Image (cartoon, grey):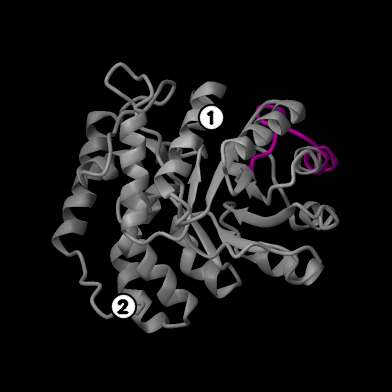
Amino acid sequence: MPKLPDWRGVFPAVTTQFHADLSLDVAGTHRVVQGLVRDGVDGLVVCGTVGENTALTLTEKQTVIEVAVDAAAGRVPVIAGVAEFTTAFAADTAVMAKRCGADGVMVMPALVYSAKPHETAAHFRGVATAIDLPVMVYNNPPIYKNDVTPDILAALADVETIVAFKESSGDGRRFTDLRNLVGDRFVLFAGLDDTVVENVMLGAVGWVSGMSNAFPQEGAALFRLAASGRYAEARPLYDWFMPLLHLDARPDLVQCIKLCEAIMGRGSALTRPPRLALPERERAEVEALMAAALKTRPSLTGLAA
């Protein structure tokens, strides 16, 4: 079995920051990454869904990766998202990510095309064999319309660079099915915020988290309590967090997460089209959720120590 990376804990799906004219805000993105590392996250995923990968040019993706690597300064691993239309372009992007200093890549299925299972497997194999960086396979069928099933992932077990699996289908049974097929061949990551504790119970050792952009300390505490089996202590924190964690499962999750991040003074709510600002009613609903959460925000003293 290939050597697996020590990727564990909370890896926020980092937001990409923009100026008012929607140009890339390099300094703002650097501040966001610095703040997350300062507040105790275990790793970073940049240029993912929440990072608005598909709204960035290739040059901008390179800049974002370089900014994250610089801001992290070797304190936590930086994983770069790869989401492209073709296998060749995805492989080139992964090579670029390595050149920028990324510690690994998170590869999404080929976008737009609804692939058959053998084509999905071939895409991941093609990208993973083009580089010698660790690869995390990302499954999010509601968003990307291609389902990376346990059978598909098991067919990729011979590819040594494929080392991790981020599961965002919402079906926790996937971890059990995969383990029954290939044992502990892959590092398992929860990818949907509002099922994280359940995923940890089923074997996830990491969490690519959206809402930890706004509440990194709470995210870290929740994950570590669950990972330690301290479910009685985790439950009230999970109960408090859940209304916000549900935002990660909406089609407009990026707008919701960035709005929460802005309310916390950690970044801007601006998103690039086609993602538009939340309509007034929905914005008010998210603001109300945040107001309630901040009013009842739990003390973390003594938790996950």
**Is residue 98 a member of the stretch shown in magenta?**
no
Mark found first going from the N terminus, 1 or 2: 1
Instruction: Give the Cα distance between marks 1 and 2.
Output: 37 Å
**Residue 3 in the image: above or below residue 134:** below
**Residue depicted at x 83% and y 40%:** 122
Q: Note whether residue 256 is visible.
A: no
The residue at 25%/72% (across/down) is 300
Residue 191 location, x and y as percent?
A: 53, 54
Q: Which element carries disc 2, helix, strand or loop?
A: loop
The quarter of the picture where the C terminus appears is: bottom left
Mark 2: few/some/many CA within 10 Å (<14, 14-19, 20+): some
Where residue 142 sits, quadrant-wise, is top right
- Give the answer, above or below, for where 62 lies relative to 20: below
- Would residue 171 be found to the left or right of residue 245 on screen? right
Residue occupying image coordinates x 25% and y 36%: 283
Image height of 127 relative to 42, above or below = above
Which disc number belongs to residue 303?
Answer: 2
Q: Classify 10 Å Cα crowding around label 1: few (below 14), some (14-19), many (20 and above).
A: some
Amino acid at pointer 1:
Gln
Query: In x, y percent, where is residue 256?
Result: 34, 40
Residues drawn in magenta = 107-122
- The residue that label 1 is drawn on is 62
187 to 226, vertically: above or below: above
- Horizontal placement of 145 versus 117: left or right? left
- Along the horizontal axis of the image, is 265 left or right of 167? left
Q: How many labels does the image show?
A: 2
The quarter of the picture where the N terminus appears is bottom right
Q: Position of residue 151 (x, y in %)?
A: 80, 56
For label 1, the SS is helix
Question: Residue shown at 76%/44% (left/top)?
Answer: 128
C-beta proximity under 8 Å, tags 1 and 2: no
